[in-house]
Amino acid sequence: MRLVAHLDDLDLPVAGILVGDRVLTLALLVERAGLRDELALLDPRGLLAEDEDLAETRAAVARAERAGLAGVPAATLRRTAILEPGKIVCVGHNYAGHVREQGLPLPTRPMLFAKFANAVVGDGEPVIRPSTTHALDLEAELAVVIGRRARRVAAVDALAHVAGYAGANDVSARDLQGSRPALREDERGDGQWLRAKGSDTFLPLGPCLVTADELPDPGNLAVRGYHTPASGPEAGREVRVQDGRTSDMVFSVAELIAFISASITLQPGDVIVTGTPSGVGVFRDPPVFLAPGDVVRVEVEGIGSLTNPIVDADGTAPAGTPAARLLGGTPG
Ligand code: ZN
């Protein structure tokens, strides 16, 4: 199943099942396909918390499809981020190619850092470049969503704790991060990565959560990052800047869950963002950074495409830019 979330009449997020370009909302499944009505108000995180709820939803979707129930056009729903994670554990330096482009040795254990839920936005929602940075960058990544509590889990058992997968963009302010090619003469980084990685809107997540039964091997998926600059020689043209495979990961999804859960208990709805392949802007020659008006896109094989316009701290993109067009001419 492909889970998405939309806002209901009370502006609360509720889950839906994406089928093509239409959504079977839980309300519709209750009304027309025999889903238990207590489930109608759940968001995707709530739905993932109980295996039985997810199984019951899957059965209702199958009945709906057999009955030819069409669902609601996705474009007519107020789509929102697929979930608000309790914990977001990110992994740095986890693709051999990305480690090489920094001239670093391969890590001997996963390098972890964190983001908070303030960073999460959904497909199509703007990413804000705050006034605190001049060196915004993208990182296309595979996100793992936990479905079953994981504490001290062995790698061989780890994938049984995964609810599903999504695309993620680990948006990063390279100057705050202290990345040398991004620093101007008088600048130093923050010494840690909280502002650099955890600022508002710095984690687009989506476009949907694909349940693990549909992606049995997370270890061999293409992960690609795209940048459509608003200015410069490539203005208005989408450039593929990252083209990796999860088989290049230093630590697999299962190894990451084992490592993290040895000391941090993972709960349903927690997210692991598993690292990025080579090609990010800061290590290009010359470096390429994101500006208001640009558009970024992450594509993960088997999951889909996650597109976000870049806006300034006031929420606007210059008129006529790819971001402004994506926002429908009324950015902000
Ligand atoms: Zn990253």
Image: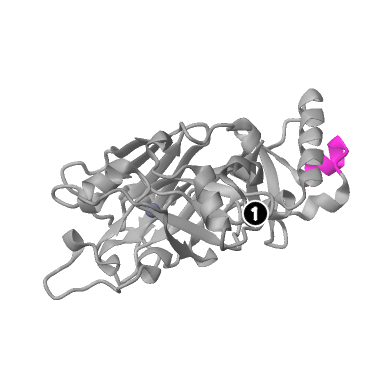
Q: Please name the predominant secondary structure of the magenta segment in the image.
A: helix
Q: Which residue does the image show at 62% across and 37% down from the upper left?
A: 212
Q: Is residue 87 above or below residue 16?
A: below
Amino acid type, callout 1: Ala
Q: Quadrant of the N terminus?
A: top right
Q: Residue furthest left?
A: 185
Residue 288 in view: no
Q: Is residue 267 magenta?
A: no
Label 1 neighbour load within 10 Å: few <14, some 14-19, many 20+: many
Between 113 and 11, the residue placed more toward the observer is 113
Magenta-colored stretch includes residue 31:
yes
**Residue 200 in sight from this viewpoint:** yes
- Image spot of residue 229 (x, y percent): 26, 47
Examine the rendered structure and indicate whether residue 275 appears above or below residue 2.
Answer: below
Give the magenta part as a residue range: 27-35
Using the image, determine if residue 113 lies above or below residue 272: below
The residue that appears at 30% across and 73% down in the rendered structure is 191
In the rendered view, does 300 fall on the left or right side of 254? left
Say which residue label 1 marks.
150
Q: Residue 244 placed where, x, y %?
A: 35, 36
158 or 201: nearer the viewer: 158
